[in-house]
Amino acid sequence: MTASEASIPAPADLLEIARDIAVRAGSAALEARRAGVEVAATKSTPVDIVTAVDRDTEALIRELILEARPDDGILGEEDAARVGTSGVEWIVDPIDGTVNFLYGIPAWAVSIAVVAGPPNPGEWTALAGVVVNPVTGELFEASRGGGARLAGRELAVNEEVPLSHALVGTGFAYSAERRREQAQVLTGLLPLARDIRRIGSAALDLCGLAAGRLDAFYEVGLNPWDHAAGALIAREAGAIVTGVDGGPESVEFLLAAAPGLHEELRAALRAAGAPA
């Protein structure tokens, strides 16, 4: 163990901090939503939006992180990355599901993960993760080796579900060209599965997998903050989470499912044209 590894707190301790920050940020975002919200800017395309609440919520999360752990790094969706010196990185999505948030659809979340190592899913070790849906009050959480929970209840993925009986979650990119490609994959997959769900928040999809509300989830184009907390929660609930060719999850591809279904779904997605 290196000196930097030895100085990293226990996952359970980091989870306690992350939980408190996520709850406070979620309450602030919900209060702001009730007061009204509008688009503040766009990002990759005209339909890829950001609201003032996204920015304000991330600013609050950063402030609370630095109060608790001033030497840590922070990678968030809305602001520049902060380089830390502790070996601990916080991966933050202040509002995952911004379009749902804008339209008042109750499927958006505050997602906060804590990792050791560089802010890259292929290189980090996820230590703690919290995903809060402020509208429903549900709080999903996990720590490395400590299991995944919802309201104190241990979570476990659905086992022994064949693809023909699987409810599969996915999402779509903001790029028109990538959406065409995703639609082609979906056309090949849909006849093979029980059904498809598009909820609009990757963080909640991964938590839904952990809670048995979905049997699998896949998507192309996710950023680290979209899945960092949710992927840990899914893994701690028994899911296999991979990227291209079974490697680490990345912007190119993410697939999460129980062990038996994972390989069957990966083969079906590859046959349908996904980079599985």
Image (cartoon, helix red, strand yellow):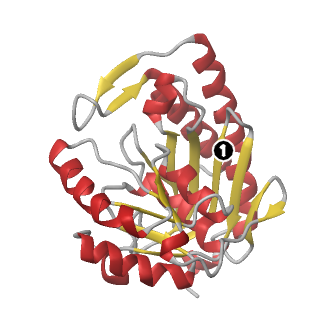
Q: With respect to residue 96, does 247 lie above or below?
A: below
Q: Residue at x 22, y 58 (%)?
A: 184
Residue flagged by tag 1: what amino acid is it? Answer: Val
Residue 91 pos. (x, y %) = 50, 54
Question: Camera-side residue: 117 or 261?
Answer: 261
**Split into 4 quadrants, where in the image is the N terminus?**
bottom right
Residue at the outermost top position: 35
Q: Nearer the viewer, residue 2 or 199?
A: 199
Residue sitting nearer the eye, 177 or 82: 177
Q: Quadrant of residue 207?
A: bottom right
Identity of the residue drawn at 23% across and 48% down: 179
* Residue 70: image location, x then y, percent: 59, 49
- Dividing the picture into quadrants, the one containing residue 189 is bottom left
Q: Residues within 10 Å of mark 1 (few under 14, many from 20)?
A: many
Residue 261 visible in the snapshot: yes
Q: Quadrant of residue 191?
A: bottom left
**Residue at the spot x=57%, y=67% of the render?**
215
182 relative to 241 in the view: left or right: left
**Which residue is label 1 attached to?**
132
